Image (tube, grey):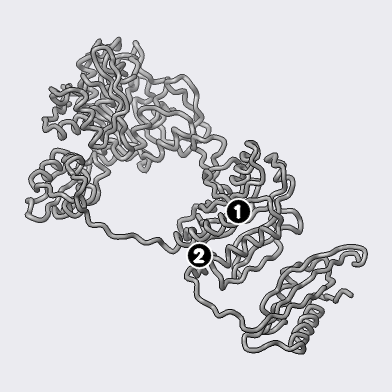
Amino acid sequence: MIISWDWLKQYVDLDLPLEDVTTRLTMSGLNLETTEPAGSDFAIDLEVTSNRPDCLGHLGIAREVAVLFGKTLKVPAAAPKTVAETAASATSVAIECPDLCPQYHARVLRGVKVGPSPAWLRQRLETVGIASVNNVVDVTNYVMLECGQPLHAFDFDRLDGKKIVVRRAQAGEKLQAIDHKEYALTPEMCVIADGKRPVAIAGVMGGATTEIESSTKNVLIEAAAFAPLTVRNTARKLNLHSPSSYRFERALDPAGPDWASRRCCELILEIAGGELLAGSVAVGQTVVAERPPIALRFAQFRRILGIEIPISEAASILESLGCRQVGPVGADTAEFAPPTFRRDLSREIDLIEEVARIHGYEQIPDDVLVPLCSSAKTRRDRVTDRVRDTLTAAGFFEAVTLSFVAAEQRALFTPHGDRPALEVVHSSRRHENLLRQSLVPSLLASRRENERHGVFHAQLFEVAKVYLAADSSKPETQNEPWTISLVGGQSYQELKGVVELLARRVAPHAAVRVRPSDVGQFVPGRGAEVLLDGELWGWLGELDRSAVSALDLRDSVCVAELNLHVLEARADLVPKAQPLPQFQAVTRDLNFVLDETVHWSDLEQVVRSAAGPLLETVAFGGQYRGKQIPEQKKSYVVTLGYRSHERTLTGDEVDAAQQAVIAACGQKLAATLRA
């Protein structure tokens, strides 16, 4: 927000050096960016945070200065003279979309003389970077920069039917704005229309057909309130941003339109002459309800700030900021109703912050004792810490990538199938505007960047959210699940080992299983769904060359994507001592010949169910296809480990278990032992 030093003096007596004022403003939350000379004036650029739209005008800054230095704020009366004829007899206003435009004020001036603005007005606008257009348009800009409420002036004689209709745009409608560019409108946009066509894009920019020109005699002044989201979406979709849209996006004072329209007409009468019809045509929620009071406990100053602030000073600060005292100030508590222009004041802590910043943060000693309590990591924090420790120990580096991806990037890995993409159509990122539904594409792009800089074989992981849906009826775990993704150059078996290691480190009692996956980006036969205790945990596999080539990656890549919530639910992060085995294990191999359609997961499941209680481990020992194996057949080597915690096993016990496994595999999978 750029303000004029001379302009600021109109509202508060400033007999102080400029540097003192900007320093205090910075210390109170309005950070000084730059101060530039502008002729005999100074242009002061202040950083105004998005929760303080009341400071997007000179009056808002002047109010802060007046409170900080104990000065009196001088607000113009905004009491223009009117004629007997009423505005309601000359025009009408209808709001067809109250959800997008809660209130609208229209005032009518007749017989104005459009021409150049006086020197003082041009100079003030030029100081803050606004070019002069003509006296009427300049006044609308001046009042916006004065109080923060945008306005618009229409050539009243060019309004069809001499009326205003606030509505949604119709499909196919177009509007030539005052920048003389044509914009295609869509039904979710709010427009200001006359009896025939749109004449302005609500909250963003007026139309060229009704703009103020030298021939204009009669003027309709608009002051309205628009829903911040519709203005933001419209401005972004049309890539059309203005000082008005910047302010409307930040939820302005609902009591502002009436004062601003009166002030605007007052200045137009002063500068351009003419006459103002009595009253305004006000439609919508023009009666602004008072804010509910907030209880303030004065003991909280000592507890939170560590210092005592006198009750009288705290009450005086809040009242000077516009808060209304409700009832008497007691020895312990008081109630204050925030003003309508301070939407950011809603809790007791907000009032405490206001008192603290005006009293002065520098008044709080460095060694003040403030009671603190220790915080504890959540279960998820501890799980993600264990995940990070495990993966970095396995040779992976953690990456942090953006939440947005491009359409072609998203297509690199789609484990969730044809789930519709969540597109941010109004994003300033016109290309990468899809919310990611997998972390893998972004990690692949990071691996490519590493290769381009000469770092090959980068093994990366990320723990972050993906965005699958925007359904408020579903829990977060379905809409925005936390995900663990890995990308590396290992083989499928090696990456599967890393996934199993991760499960053992976080959930040592959970069983990891895999089954064939139908994810289209995996090499056939080298992709799997990963199950944790029978629940789908994620996906693991080697990417097809088409996906790798799309990013111009040099080597083959294996990836894994796992659901953090599934792992967290089974996490056992406190290790428990287990006695070492007292009796040795017995290891046996079985080499089965099976049909090509039988997967390792099928074989493993049958082996585990048939081997009995002595079975301790089942491991993949190898796979073979060749001359000694019939066509459409393959062989799997299964390594089985048997152990008893009570005695040494006998050969007969192990043989019996082996025979049970052979029989079950033959019966259920038509497996035969390879000679």
Count of numbered badges drawn on the protein: 2
Kind of residue indicated by mark 1: Gly
Residue holding disc 2: 568
- Residue 327 in the image, given as x and y percentages of width and height: 9, 51
Q: CA distance from mark 1 to mark 2?
A: 22 Å
Query: In the visual, does 196 lie left or right of 434?
Result: left
Q: Residue at x 42, y 21 (%)?
A: 178
Query: In the visual, does 167 lie left or right of 339?
Result: right
Front-most of residues 34 and 450: 450
Farthest residue in the right direction? 627
Q: Are marks 1 and 2 in contact (CB under 8 Å)?
A: no
- In this rendering, the answer to whether 72 lies above or below 217 is below
Q: Secondary structure at mark 1?
A: loop
- Residue 412 in the image, given as x and y percentages of width and height: 66, 46
Front-most of residues 347 and 613: 613
Q: Residue at x 52, y 69 (%)?
A: 570
